[in-house]
């Protein structure tokens, strides 16, 4: 009746195409399977074994990742395993076991339940929310269950059998005697149909099941019936010396050893045996009743061999295979594929099978073969069978018959792929029972044919077996008769996926770039190192080609590449790797833009796609020297008082472009880096482009800096461009004005050395130069020439013994444009010439001098405070000198305290001389001075800018940022 029923539902357990990635669960080390491709790659690489990706497992196929970076795809035309609702997989097992309300196969691709007797349906079949039932019209007896078959004794000498298959079931009436064959209920059997699927008869005698919308959800091929005639001569060759009895005995042995009721040689409820007489069966559907009318000729044939089987199989047959016979007669070959000339019925047979190869789309085939198992052959020795690809797919329900001319093989096939010779005669005529034989079709012709199918994105790859060769010979030769298992036929394909397109990585900020490290990148070297992330779906050793072109085009000028030395990277598992290549010297030119890309090759020389084009511009030219300016702290001038924040503006002027002299020039500086000696670290400030410029546009940045201490500061500034080129550093010196009560005190009390310590505003015992906080920057003096520490007035002192002796600070101490005072104890050893005690350098002349003037007091000499109206040695100095009337004229060998004061408020300079601690009021003299200027050089002890070396001792030198009063000076003189 229903010879076969093919569900058109999607395959349960189908997964995403290989090459993608899913979240990998933890997989035990060196296991044979893993949750997904990524995990399988990792294990295969680490353990050196093939590992199955269970995420890509289906009922009919498996995918294994190999340690060599390839994958193997194994697919059958029939289901091999079942995907259970809990997510687990189990091999197909049609053995029946008891369940509530009946019997079910342990694991089948069809959800079928067989009756345990009574009024329950013979078969209940559930599929994707639909249900279909077939019932016997009267209560069933309890079945006898063995293996995959349940047997119900429905009439005397008549059994109703139902057998579970991989994809459904088959049921048959087994008529054991002629008397039973005369039963009208056997001659025309009535079955009751139920469920929500509508059953319709097809033109070819099969059935179609449709849902409420009319959509076909299942089909079956036409039914048949057959008797139990067995023809040993047709079953197989009988060698000389083997008697018919021996052959029959061997055949009986085979039958007894079969685990199923079907041995493939003798008739069973599954299929006719060799030599069985077959006949068509009519089936009709009337409402909820299915009527199966047996062929009356065969049923009443006196020569028929009982039992007779009336077959109404019902299968979802997710598999896809079919046959053709030269007589275009329906048969019921549900488990084996017949090939060659069947002497029993005089017809030639061809078998076809389809493989779902959708998983191979886009893959590169490395090898391919078809593996089958020969169940039985007529011949005792090897005979040939040929593998073809017909010019199309199967056109009937699985297990059904195609017309002989529908898919011709031999010379009219689309491709002849291979031939194989073998034997597996189990009919007994060979004198021994020959075992099943593996049939491997592995010709080199299969690979390109399958590759073409994969490239064309085929989902189905159909093959056919024929005894005929390419010129249509030998098909009617009896010794080529063979039967292959339909559930042991596989397409086994080893394939590879091309490497993934590389992904460009940022260039190195250490050696190549700075701000623009990704496309469009700007580099500061003509030998940048190009780096990509490389990967392969199955890992392994990859080789990467880099190329640099003049434009982003395949046809643009090739500037350079590494085609003679590809970069090799080994990736472990599915992890990515890195490929780096340094552009050779002499290939790239400064101020030029290039375009680069990369592609990867694997162990099988599969070529990955190119990466995206990456733009790279070479700029190896450093920025110009920047400028800096500040209104609060002008360069090399006294600025705001310490603690006052100042704004500093940096700028970089782009260089002149000789090639484009009329073009507007834009600076490419992106940052300025700056730092100030002695305060804080390095700071980087982003640059902005000048606006409103017409010919030259500078890069600008304004920063704020608040000096924490006074005196001279140096700000260092350099410009950086996007490539990381660093320009020259400018040293911007500015002077931070001290607080109004700032003072400096060089005690000169050191025992030795070349440094005179400044303890001003840091010594709590100093009566007039007490501490004032943390804003103080000490100004130590450096001894040079003929000067050393020795006994002085207040401990040790600086003793100057010859020309060239001096003590100088590192920079200016007082702002000579504002009020200040200087003082010291002195003891001259010679007054033969003019001599300076303290001064502060200008460029050409001293800004002030506290000095001995030999010409003062009509040549008698005197202690003076001298200034100049400008920084020139040619202008007339302005001096005020003590006349010696109170403390006496200068004399050698005597300590005297001398001070000089400039009062910017009154516009006067004053000299103050105290002869000793008893006469602190001393002697003073003043004069007007209204044209001060800024002497920005070092403060010097023991000389002037123009010489006037001091000979003798100098002790306890003070400097102040204010005009000292007589009382203040008296305090100094009383020390």
Image (tube, rainbow, N blue to C red):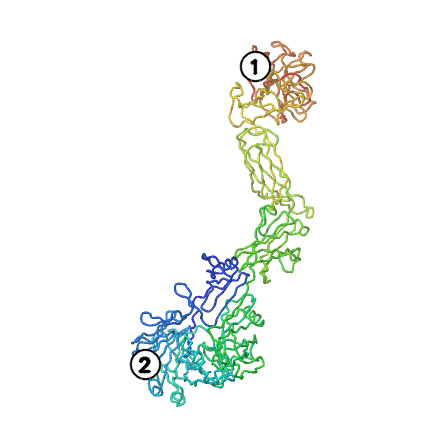
Residue neighbourhood size for the residue with mark 1, other residues' Cα within 10 Å, grouped as few (<14), some (14–19), many (≥20): many
Residue beneath disc 2: 154
Identify the image quadrant of residue 265: bottom left
| Residue at the far bottom in the pictured view | 302
Secondary-structure class at tag 2: strand
Closer to the camera in the image, 597 or 931: 597
Which badge, 1 or 2, comes first in the chain's sequence?
2
Closer to the camera in the image, 269 or 927: 269
Secondary-structure class at tag 1: helix
| Quadrant housing the N terminus | bottom left
Identify the image quadrant of residue 262: bottom left
Identify the image quadrant of residue 383: bottom right
Left or right: 775 in relation to 788: left
Residue 843, position as x, y percentages in the image: 67, 27
> Alpha carbon of mark 1 to alpha carbon of mark 2: how far?
143 Å
Decide: is 608 above or below 477. Answer: above
Cβ atoms under marks 1 and 2 closer than 8 Å: no
Closer to the camera in the image, 908 or 381: 381
Left or right: 744 in relation to 243: right
| Quadrant housing the C terminus | top right
Which one is in front in this view, the residue at disc 1 or the one at disc 2?
2
Closer to the camera in the image, 368 or 726: 368
Residue 681, position as x, y percentages in the image: 55, 36
Q: Is residue 901 visible?
A: no
Residue beneath disc 1: 973
Q: Is residue 145 visible?
A: yes
Residue neighbourhood size for the residue with mark 2, other residues' Cα within 10 Å, grouped as few (<14), some (14–19), many (≥20): some
């Amino acid at each position: 009746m229903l010879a076969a029923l093919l569900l058109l539902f999607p395959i349960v357990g189908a997964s995403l195409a290989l090459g993608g990635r899913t979240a990998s669960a933890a997989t035990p080390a060196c296991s044979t399977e893993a949750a997904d491709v990524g995990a399988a790659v990792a294990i295969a690489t680490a353990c050196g074994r093939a590992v199955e990706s269970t995420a890509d497992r289906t009922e009919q196929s498996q995918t294994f990742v190999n340690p060599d970076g390839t994958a193997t795809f194994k697919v059958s035309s029939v289901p091999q395993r079942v995907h259970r609702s809990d997510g687990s997989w189990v091999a197909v097992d049609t053995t029946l076991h008891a369940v509530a309300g009946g019997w079910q196969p342990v694991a089948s691709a069809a959800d079928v339940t067989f009756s345990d007797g009574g009024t329950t349906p013979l078969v209940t079949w559930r599929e994707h929310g639909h249900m279909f039932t077939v019932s016997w019209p009267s209560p069933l007896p309890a079945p006898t269950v063995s293996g995959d078959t349940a047997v119900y004794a429905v009439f005397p000498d008549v059994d109703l059998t139902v057998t579970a298959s991989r994809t459904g079931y088959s049921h048959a009436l087994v008529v054991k005697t002629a008397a039973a064959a005369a039963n009208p209920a056997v001659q025309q059997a009535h079955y009751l149909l139920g469920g929500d699927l509508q059953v319709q008869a097809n033109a070819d005698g099969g059935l179609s099941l449709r849902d409420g919308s009319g959509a076909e959800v299942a089909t079956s091929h036409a039914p048949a019936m057959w008797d139990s005639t067995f023809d040993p001569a047709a079953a197989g060759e009988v060698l000389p010396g083997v008697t018919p009895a021996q052959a029959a005995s061997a055949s009986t042995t085979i039958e007894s050893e079969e685990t199923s009721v079907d041995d493939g040689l003798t008739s069973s409820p599954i299929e006719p045996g060799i030599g069985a007489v077959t006949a068509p069966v009519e089936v009709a559907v009337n409402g909820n009743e299915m009527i199966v009318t047996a062929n009356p000729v065969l049923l009443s044939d006196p020569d028929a061999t009982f039992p007779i089987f009336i077959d109404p199989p019902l299968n979802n047959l997710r598999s896809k295979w079919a046959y053709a016979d030269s007589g275009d007669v329906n048969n019921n070959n549900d488990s084996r594929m017949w090939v060659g000339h069947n002497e029993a019925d005089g017809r030639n047979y061809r078998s076809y099978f389809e493989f779902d190869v959708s998983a191979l789309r886009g893959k590169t085939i490395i090898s391919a073969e078809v593996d089958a198992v020969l169940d039985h052959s007529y011949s005792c020795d090897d005979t040939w069978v040929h593998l073809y690809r017909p010019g199309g797919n199967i056109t009937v329900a699985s297990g059904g018959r195609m017309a002989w001319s529908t898919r011709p093989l031999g010379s009219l096939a689309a491709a002849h792929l291979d031939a194989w010779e073998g034997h597996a005669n189990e009919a007994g005529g060979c004198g021994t029972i020959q075992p099943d034989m593996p049939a491997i079709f592995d010709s080199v012709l299969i690979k390109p044919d399958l590759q073409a199918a994969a490239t064309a994105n085929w989902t189905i790859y159909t093959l056919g077996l024929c005894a005929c060769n390419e010129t249509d010979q030998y098909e009617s030769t009896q010794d080529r008769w063979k039967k292959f298992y339909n559930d042991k036929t596989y397409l086994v394909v080893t394939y590879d996926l091309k490497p993934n397109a590389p992904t460009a990585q940022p260039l190195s900020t250490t050696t190549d770039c700075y701000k623009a490290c990704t496309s469009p990148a700007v580099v500061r070297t003509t030998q940048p190192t190009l780096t990509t992330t490389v990967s392969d779906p199955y890992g392994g050793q990859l080789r990467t080609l880099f190329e640099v072109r003049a434009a982003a085009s395949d046809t643009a000028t090739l500037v350079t590449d590494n085609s003679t030395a590809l970069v090799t990277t080994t990736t472990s598992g599915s992890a990515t790797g890195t490929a780096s290549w340094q552009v050779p010297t002499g290939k790239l030119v400064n101020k030029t833009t290039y375009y680069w890309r990369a592609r990867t090759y694997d162990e099988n020389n599969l070529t990955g796609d190119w990466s995206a084009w990456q733009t790279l511009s070479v700029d190896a030219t450093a920025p110009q020297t920047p400028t800096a300016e500040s209104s609060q702290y002008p360069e090399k001038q006294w600025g705001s008082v310490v603690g006052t924040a100042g704004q500093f503006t940096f700028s970089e002027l782009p260089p002149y472009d000789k090639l484009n002299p009329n073009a507007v020039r834009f600076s490419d500086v992106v940052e300025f880096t700056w730092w100030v000696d002695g305060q804080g670290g390095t700071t980087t400030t982003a640059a902005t482009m000048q606006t409103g410029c017409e010919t030259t546009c500078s890069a600008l940045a304004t920063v704020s800096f608040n000096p924490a201490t006074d005196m001279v500061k140096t700000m260092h500034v350099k410009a950086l461009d996007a490539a990381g080129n660093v320009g020259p550093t400018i040293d911007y010196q500015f002077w931070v004005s001290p607080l109004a009560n700032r003072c400096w005190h060089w005690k000169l009390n050191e025992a030795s050395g070349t440094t005179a310590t400044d303890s001003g505003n840091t010594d709590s015992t100093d009566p007039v130069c007490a501490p004032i906080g943390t804003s103080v920057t000490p100004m130590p003096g450096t001894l040079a020439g003929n000067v050393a520490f020795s006994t002085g007035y207040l401990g040790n002192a600086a003793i100057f013994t010859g020309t060239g002796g001096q003590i100088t600070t590192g920079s200016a101490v007082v702002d000579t444009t504002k009020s200040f005072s200087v003082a010291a104890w002195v003891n001259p050893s010679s007054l033969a010439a003019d001599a300076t005690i303290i001064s502060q350098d200008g460029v050409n002349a001293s800004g002030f001098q506290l000095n001995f003037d030999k010409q003062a007091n009509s040549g008698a000499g005197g202690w003076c405070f001298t200034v100049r109206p400008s920084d020139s040695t040619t202008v007339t100095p302005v001096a005020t000198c003590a006349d010696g009337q109170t403390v006496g004229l200068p004399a050698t060998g005597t300590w005297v305290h001398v001070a000089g004061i400039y009062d910017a408020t009154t516009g006067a300079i004053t000299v103050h001389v105290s002869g000793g601690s008893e006469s602190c009021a001393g002697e003073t003299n003043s004069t007007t001075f209204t044209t001060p200027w800024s002497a920005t050089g070092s403060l010097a002890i023991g000389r002037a800018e123009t010489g006037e070396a001091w000979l003798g001792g100098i002790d306890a030198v003070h400097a102040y940022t204010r005009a000292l009063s007589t009382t203040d000076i008296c305090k100094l003189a009383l020390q």
